[in-house]
Amino acid sequence: MRRQQSTEAWKRRYDRRAGVENTLTQGLRLTGLRVCRCIGVSKTRLQHILTVAALNLVRLDAWITERPLAKTRISAFAALQPRFA
């Protein structure tokens, strides 16, 4: 399995999976994606569409303002490195 994980094809496939998992996590954190507030298939579908639209707006805002989507941990060693502007 470790040999397979070092191939480029596996890394590309895993990158896609990581992106999908990030989207689901963001949807759960921001919009409460697990709870449907309506009864009926058409209203549930509308809620999903609005949730996706809201996530897209949040991501667009983060992209325009150049704000990262998530807090990234910085190791103690990397924190010692001087930053140049």
Image: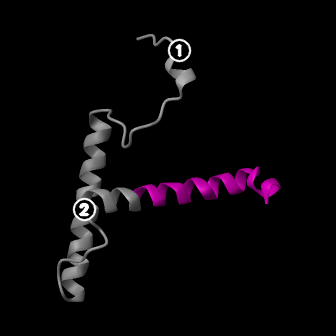
Sequence order check, earlier mark of 2 and 1: 2
Q: Is residue 51 left or right of residue 19?
A: left
Q: Secondary structure at mark 2?
A: helix
Residue 40, located in which quarter of the rendered image?
bottom left
Alpha carbon distance from label 2 to label 1:
37 Å
Q: Is residue 55 left or right of residue 19?
A: left
Q: Name which residue type carries label 1.
A: Gln
The residue identified by callout 2 is: 31
Residue stretch in magenta = 1-23
Residue 80 placed where, x, y %?
52, 15
Q: Residue at x 31, y 57 (%)?
A: 29
- Check if residue 9 falls in the magenta segment: yes
Predominant SS of the magenta segment: helix
Residue 26, located in which quarter of the rendered image?
bottom left
Front-lying residue, 51 or 30? 30
Quadrant location, the C terminus: top left
The residue identified by callout 1 is: 81
Q: Residue furthest front?
A: 76
- Check if residue 39 falls in the magenta segment: no
Q: What colour scheme was applied to this rendering of the protein? A: one colour
Front-lying residue, 46 or 84? 84
